[in-house]
Amino acid sequence: MATPTASPQVASTVGLKNVVIAPLTEDTDTSHTYGELQLVAGAIEATITPDNTDPDIQYADDIEFDVLYPDPELTFSTSMADVPLAIQEMIFGNQIDDNGVLVRTASDRPPYFAVGFKSEKSDGAFRYVWLYKVRAKPMTESYKTKEGKTITRQNGSVEWTAIKRTHDGRYQAVADEGQNGFDASKAATFLETVYEPAFTTEP
């Protein structure tokens, strides 16, 4: 009996920080471009949920004959201590006027962004994540009065739709520090620019 291949290192994720966004300024069949990175402080929770994972299965000859998979679409939810108005202006396509007031208009259209972050693991290393093309949905706002000595925190929450890039169909990149050749030096710069994959071309 063959000996199973050794399992990769296992460590649960226990943290979330260093959320960054970068505007996707161009995404065509031939190229894509991102703008300057913006740090978004105050991250509490991030959840990535696939929305359309069920394939279209064709049966023939009494077997599963062919399978078509839909384009990936994810819901990406972020809970924040607060979402500053300057960040809301960016991600929702709103506008801050000359008096520093955020104004929302019916014609506002949220632009596309890349979103990156890292999550500490129980062994002290980090998992790094980039989503390449996301757009924010209108934010639900809640406000609650103080009840004597009881104070309820009203955290900001933003829900995003993540889809594939038009240029190359890629939609997510994930790396675990210390695994698969992704060492500390690569981790140190992973969130400084939107990560672009590198594959060795077979001869």
Image: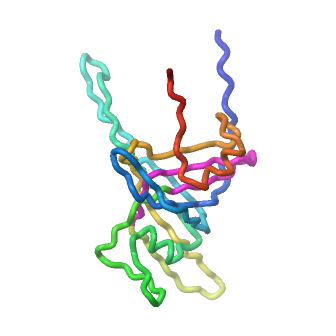
Query: What residue is rendered at 26% in x and 27% in y?
Result: 58
Query: What residue is rendered at 50% in x and 72% in y?
Result: 87
Q: Is residue 83 above or below residue 52?
A: below
**Colour scheme shown:** rainbow
Query: Looking at the rendering, which quadrant does residue 184 occupy?
Result: top right
Q: Position of residue 120 (x, y in %)?
A: 68, 52
Query: Which residue occupies the extreme top position in the image?
Result: 1
Q: Nearer the viewer, residue 157 or 143?
A: 157
Q: Position of residue 13 (x, y in %)?
A: 65, 49
Query: What residue is rendered at 41% in x and 59% in y?
Result: 25
Residue 188: tell me if it is visible.
Answer: yes
Q: Is residue 197 above or below residue 132?
A: above
Give the overall secondary structure of the magenta segment. strand
Q: Nearer the viewer, residue 198 or 13?
A: 198
Q: Is residue 108 above or below residue 134?
A: below
Q: Position of residue 143 (x, y in %)?
A: 50, 80
Part of the protein shown in magenta: 115-137
Q: Position of residue 55 (x, y in %)?
A: 34, 36
Asked if the stretch drawn in magenta spans residue 119, the answer is: yes
Residue 52: tell me if it is visible.
Answer: no
Q: Quadrant of the N terminus?
A: top right
Asked if the stretch drawn in magenta spans residue 28, the answer is: no
Q: Nearer the viewer, residue 191 or 78?
A: 191
**As drawn, is 125 to the left or to the right of 39?**
right
Query: What residue is rendered at 42% in x and 53% in y?
Result: 162
**As drawn, is 30 to the left or to the right of 193?**
left
**As drawn, is 17 to the left or to the right of 109?**
right
Query: Looking at the rendering, which quadrant does residue 186 occupy?
Result: top right
